[in-house]
Image (tube, grey):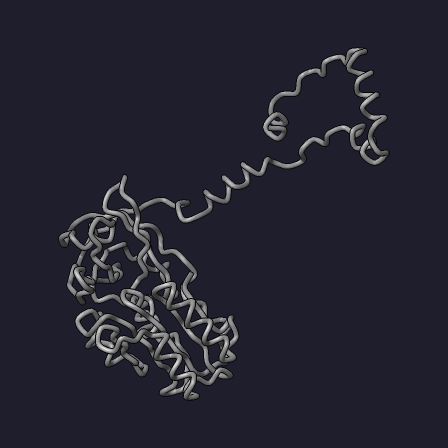
């Protein structure tokens, strides 16, 4: 309240009555000397804007501080089935200028199907400068979740109009891992999208045969890019939880125990379920990998 009052025009202070002065003097005599000085000191006027205004400023500078643009769906193809839901490759024509802002694998778009709709945050699955759906298009891997914006996107026909944000996020910043020549990549489910973009971009600078992808899905039918991944520049360790009862972190634990991970010369790139990412990072750092050598796209 004091800060809010400071912004209003200051009125002339009311005259202090004799009774008020006497009461204040008597109260002051009962206080220690240090507190008497504090009571006697005037309340300082705020020298900066209230904190509330600052927080509002920070909120505006977040994920909603942009202008939406019109885009169109140019492809909608099935890539895999995950339980009752499908994974679909959605080609979105965002325009050559907008796509030029996509420079680092791991960046993403916000996309919504209508002006008053809720936005979905979706990582770009095509590499910068590359998309099979056209010069101004990007490819997204979207899980058709019922009742969610992602489900609405997957239900759209080719030619449908959507709204998109500018390309967002820092992507996979590999600056801190330059000089490390081995990479271990981790992805689960639709989290393979930005990892695919990274592998196809040529951004990874590792020794020949020194990149390993741990790719966790339910089974082969739930694995997006199953055939394409055979041509990726890495060794793919497929972890099918339905068949083996294991998850990506379980296989990594075995590989660390057997000495397959060289903590001195390795870096990691991760995308997928939070539980998986947290456990993988904990295991890698416990094995000697620096935390800054574990790279994520957010």
> The C terminus appears in which quarter of the rendering?
bottom left
Q: Residue at x 39, y 70 (%)?
A: 270
- From the viewer's perspective, is 165 left or right of 223? right
Residue 205: where, in percent of width, then height?
41, 79
| Vertical order, 40 against 236 (above or below) | above
> The N terminus appears in which quarter of the rendering?
top right
Residue 121: where, in percent of width, then height?
32, 54
| Vertical order, 81 against 7 (above or below) | below
Q: Quadrant of residue 210?
A: bottom left
Q: Residue at x 14, y 54 (%)?
A: 158
| Vertical order, 76 against 5 (above or below) | below
Total numbered badges shown on the rendered structure: 0
Q: Residue at x 20, y 52 (%)?
A: 146
- From the viewer's perspective, is 283 left or right of 251? right
- From the viewer's perspective, is 35 left or right of 132? right
In the image, 73 versus 29, the foreground residue is 29
In the image, 217 versus 230, the foreground residue is 217
Residue 115: where, in percent of width, then height?
27, 40
Q: Residue furthest front?
A: 30
Residue 48: where, in percent of width, then height?
64, 37
Q: Quadrant of residue 223?
A: bottom left
């Amino acid at each position: 309240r004091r800060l809010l009052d400071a912004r209003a025009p200051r009125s002339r202070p009311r005259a202090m009555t004799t009774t008020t002065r006497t009461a204040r003097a008597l109260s002051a005599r009962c206080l220690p000397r240090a507190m008497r000085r504090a009571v006697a000191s005037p309340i300082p006027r705020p020298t900066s804007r209230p904190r509330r205004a600052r927080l509002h400023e920070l909120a505006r500078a977040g994920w909603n501080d942009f202008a939406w643009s019109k885009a169109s769906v140019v492809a909608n193809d099935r890539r895999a089935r995950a339980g009752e839901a499908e994974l679909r490759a959605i080609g979105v024509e965002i325009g050559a200028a907008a796509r030029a802002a996509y420079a680092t694998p791991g960046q993403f778009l916000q996309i919504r199907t209508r002006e008053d709709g809720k936005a979905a945050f979706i990582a770009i699955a095509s590499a910068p400068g590359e998309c099979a759906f056209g010069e101004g298009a990007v490819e997204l891997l979207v899980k058709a979740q019922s009742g969610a914006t992602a489900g609405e996107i997957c239900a759209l026909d080719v030619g449908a109009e959507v709204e998109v944000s500018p390309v967002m996020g820092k992507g996979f910043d590999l600056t801190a891992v330059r000089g490390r020549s081995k990479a271990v990549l981790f992805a689960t489910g639709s989290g393979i999208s930005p990892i695919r973009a990274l592998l196809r971009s040529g951004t990874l600078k590792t020794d020949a045969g020194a990149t390993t992808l741990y790719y966790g899905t339910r089974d082969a039918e739930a694995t997006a890019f199953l055939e394409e991944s055979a041509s990726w520049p890495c060794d793919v360790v497929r972890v099918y939880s339905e068949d083996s009862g294991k998850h990506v972190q379980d296989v990594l634990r075995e590989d660390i125990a057997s000495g397959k991970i060289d903590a001195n010369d390795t870096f990691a790139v991760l995308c997928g379920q939070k539980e998986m990412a947290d456990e993988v990072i904990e295991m890698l750092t416990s094995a000697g990998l620096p935390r800054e050598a574990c790279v994520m796209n957010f």
